[in-house]
Amino acid sequence: MMEFLSSIVQSPRFYALLRVAILLVITLPLLHLASVAIRRFAKRHVNEQSAMLIGKGIFYSGCVLLVVVIMQNLGFKLTAILGAAGILGVAIGFASQTSLSNIISGIFLIWERPFEAGDMIKVGDTQGVVLSIDLLSVKLRTTDNRYIRVPNESLIKSQVINITRFPIRRMDIDVGVAYKEDVGRVMQILTEIADKNPFALDEPRPLVLFKDFGDSALELMLGVWFSKTDFLNLKNSIMREIKERFDAEGIEIAFPHISVYTGTASEPFPVRVVEESKK
Amino acid sequence: MFWEPVAFKEDDCLHWQVGPCKLWVKRTEDEWQVAVQRGASENGLTVADTQEPPSGVTWTRWAAINDDYIFRLLPVMPDRPALVRPESPFTFPPQSNLHFYVSIPIWLRLATGANGGNVLRDEAVVVLSNSWFGDPMEGRLCYALKTTARRSSRFLRILPHLAACRVHIKNRSEKMLAFERLCIHTAHLCLYHDDKRFWTNQIDVTYGGESQPDSIAFAGAPKPAGQANVITEAREPVKKGLFQKSFSDFKAFVRI
């Protein structure tokens, strides 16, 4: 038994395995510590997403180097392994074109920074808060609390609206009033409503625009600037205020209607009242 | 003076009114309760009156420390800068050295403890509209304030919730200076009282022209305030060299 053990201890492979074990025990925690420290340091200079990416990059690069060193210690010929890895890489590349495309798109997204974690974005019909920007996909949380994964490739190809990029936004409210109303008075009232609302910014000034002669209404637009955090407060309050003020001022809010003529606009439509037949 | 500490007994309900803001404060066995209502009357001043609130008010509650029965209502400056615009256009001639007054509505700090150290919350006496100073991509959120830019403090309304701020403008340029808007960083202003009204520090603004940087300084209480006493210190004391560090910040601080 002792002879067997001593033969194992004296064999060169045992020492190689021991070196590898020591290397792993020392290097892996060190790599982890280094990546955490660098991530914390990077956070002071770049955003959290980039800091996380730098930390992960350092850790995985270190892991690759560690694997190479372990291979050398175990006596593998690196040139042969690298050759095989090259062939394998080509094969994997062909098999995972979509994933690679997503990874490259992810790198572009992180580099270009059209949005950051915490921003509210709209991609096609999907709108939500960015939870994370990963190498393959961007994770969103919608306002009704659904989790959506959007592949990076589709984000690069499509139009992305970053709703909360800037600190203030403009809310455009379409208002239609009846043709009989005095447009100047309506425009003045809309300005007054915006001026009195505490969530509407006094500056930039609210915009009142006479848009068009619509089919059923005079179409106006009230554009009110607001701080991005006040969207709901402003939307709820100003819509109610417009309705209440228009009611108080006797201004008719128009709705779609159809006039039916009998051939001449001025002639009344003949109506025949028919008594219900007695059974 | 409404900012003096008031000792409560268990189940007391006291009422304050400062300008249009009405407050009811209740001390129960183990909590403080506060209800706020803003009315139309601007001139009201009631201090620690025993009055029950109207039905339907919303109470906010705070857990109380057992032996803490002292309540203080402290006047403080608003929590955001005020973007002041003149009601009618106002222009300063070249090489002029003039001043005008701005009335700023104060806030109320609800605090407990003998020295008011336990702050419950800050409450605006008047809810002002929001405004924005800067361009739509970068700037700061402010409160909108209109001013008649009175040249003498005699013409300012004396109301319990308004603080008079004297703004001294030195137009060092060779051009007329149109007063369009002035961003007053209220966090750097102290509140004084001279037995009649609140005052803030005097603000000295020197305009050197478009190519020259403006300079701004905060003096103490202005001359018309006489021997006014400091009631509350500034939320953020001005740091020396703050505006020399960043020219863009400096420009954003005050622009007329």
Image: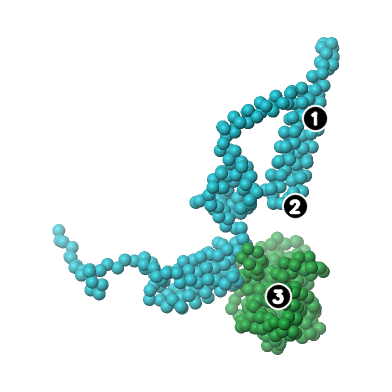
- Specify the amino acid type for callout 2: Arg
Instruction: Residue at the far left: name it.
Output: A279
- In this rendered view, identify the residue nearer to me: B232 or A181: A181
Residue at (62% x, 48% y) in the render: A109
Label 1, label 2: how far apart the Cα atoms are: 32 Å
Residue at (71% x, 75% y) in the render: B210
* Residue placed under numbered mark 3 in the picture: B210
> In what element is the residue under mark 2?
loop
Q: Which chain is the one coloured cyan?
A: A
**Mark in the foreground, 3 or 1:** 3
* Residue placed under numbered mark 1 in the picture: A23
Residue A149 showing in the rendered view: no
> In what element is the residue under mark 1?
helix
Residue at (59% x, 38% y) in the render: A100
Label 3, label 2: how far apart the Cα atoms are: 35 Å
Determine whether B147 is above or below A133 in the image: below
* Residue placed under numbered mark 2 in the picture: A44
In the rendered image of the structure, the colour used to display chain B is: green
In the image, are marks 1 and 2 on the same chain?
yes
- In this rendered view, identify the residue nearer to me: B25 or B52: B25
Residue B107 location, x and y as percent? 69, 72
Residue A212 location, x and y as percent? 42, 69
Confirm or deny contact between disc 3 and disc 1 (CB under 8 A).
no
Residue B254 location, x and y as percent? 71, 73
- Specify the amino acid type for callout 3: Glu
